[in-house]
Image: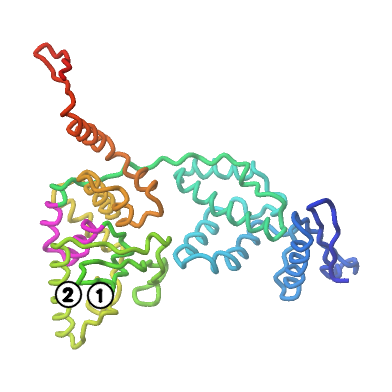
Amino acid sequence: MRGHIIKRGKNSYTVVINTGRDPVTNKYKTQWVSIKGTKKDAEKRLSELLHQLDNGTFMSPSKTTLAEYLNKWLLDYAKVNLSPRGYERYESIIRIHLIPGLGSITLTQLRPDHLQSHYTDKLKSGLSALSVRYLHTVLHKALQTAIKRGLIGRNIADGVDVPRAQRNDMQTWDEYDVDRFLEMAKSSPYYELFYLALFTGMRRGELLALRWQDIDFLFAQISVNRTLHRLQGGKYGDGSYVFTQPKTEKSRRTIALSPSSILMIKKYKENRAALFAELGRSLKDSHLVFSNNEGQPLRPNTITRAWTMLATRAGIKVIRLHDARHTHASLLLKQGIHPKIVQERLGHASIQITLDTYSHVAPGMQADAANQFEKLISHSYNYTVNDNESIKKSY
C-alpha cells in the first residue's frame, strides 16, 4: 500500500505515505502528515502527496531546510501567482535577506525566536523597519502555503513582534509650485508626461503604459487598464519591460481630462505623428503615448531623474514623481471636490484609503465646513465679537 489515512479525532486525520526504501537499511520509509478537516480533505492531501512522489517533487518536512522550501515555493507559488515584478521582488528578498540568515534551519524546527533575532539583526545592519516588515510578509505567506501542504502545523511567523514602520511625510506642491514646475518643464521632452501626472494623478507605470487607443479625444478621458514595469538585470529592448494589469479592480478606471489637458495631448499627438512620418513610419493607436523615437518604452528611472532635475531648476522643493499624485489629490480636496471623486480618479480600492492618506488636508476642510454651516443658519441667530473680545449673542 502506497498510502493510507488514519482518523485521529473529530476533525483530525493523519496521512501516511510510503516514500520508498532507505538505501542504508533497506527498510521502507514512511511519512506522516497531520490534516485538520474532513476525511475528504485528508483524501485530497493523500492524492497530492502521491502525485508529488510520482513526479519527484515530494519534500519531507523533517529534512527540508527553509532554503530548500523557499526556493521551491518561489517556483511553485510565486512565479505562478505574482506579476513578473512581484516575483522579482519576492525572489530578491528571499535570496538576499531570508536564506543567508535562516536558510539552514529545518522547516519543522523553525521557531519564532529565530525570526525575532533575524529581524533584530537586520535592523541593526541598517535595513529599515518598513523593509523588515516586507520580508516578514513574504515569509509569512510562504509558511502559510506550507501549512496548506501539510508540511508544518502552524505559522510560527504569527508569534513574532514585527517592528513598526515609520511612514515618510507626504510632500506636495501648492498651485504656485505646480505652475513654476510646468513652466520650467516646457523645454523638457517629458513635459506632456509630467503635465498629465499632475493633472490626472496617474502613477508613473500607468503613464508609461498608456497607448493612444486609451485616450478618448471625443469625450476627453483616459482609460487606465495596464501598467509598465521594468525588471532588474535586463538591457534595453531585450524583454525586460513588461506590461501587466492594474493591481486591483479599482485601479482599472476612467479619468476625465481637463480642457487644457486634452488640447495639450492633441497637439502632442500631432507632433509625434509628424516625427514618425519623418522617420518613415506612421503613428498607430496601439503605439505608446510616451516612448522613444523607436516606439520603445521610456526608462522609468530616467523619467524620475528628469523630474528631480526640473524641480531643482525651478527653485521649488523637490518632491518625488509619485508625489505628483498626492499633489493632484490634495489640491482637489482643498477645492472642495468630494473624496469619492478623488478616490475614483486615483484608483484607490476604497474611499477609506483616500481619507486616511489625505487626512493632512482635513484641518482646512474642517474650517471650511464650519464656516459653511454658519452661513447656512445665520438667518436664525449669530454671534458677534465686541471691542473687548467678548462674544455677544443676537437673535
Give residue 30's position: percent from left, percent from top.
Answer: 84, 63
Between 177 and 377, which is closer to the camera in this rendering?
Answer: 377
Residue pictured at 46% horizontal, 48% vertical: 131
Residue highlighted by disc 1: 212
Quick check: 115 above or below 347? above
Q: Is residue 157 magenta?
A: no
Q: Position of residue 308 (x, y in %)?
A: 23, 54
Query: Do callouts 2 and 1 mark residues in contact (Cβ within 8 Å)?
Result: yes
Image quarter (top left, top right, bottom left or bottom right) of the C terminus: top left
Question: Which residue extends farthest left?
Answer: 387
Query: Which residue: 38% across, 77% down?
Result: 238
Query: How far apart are labels 2 and 1 at the CA level?
Result: 8 Å
Packing grade of label 2 (10 A; few <14, some 14-19, many >=20) is some
> What amino acid type is highlighted by mark number 1?
Trp
Magenta region = 179-200
Residue that mark 2 sits on: 269
Q: Camera-side residue: 8 or 298? A: 8
Task: Inspect the image, locate mark 2, and give the three-letter code of the amino acid beneath it.
Answer: Lys
Q: Quick check: 367 left or right of 15?
A: left
- Determine the residue positioned at 20% across, 55% down: 309
Look at the magenta stretch and give its main secondary structure. helix
Q: Quadrant of residue 144?
A: bottom right
Where residue 299 appears, as percent x and y from the top left, is 30, 67
The secondary element bearing badge 2 is classed as helix
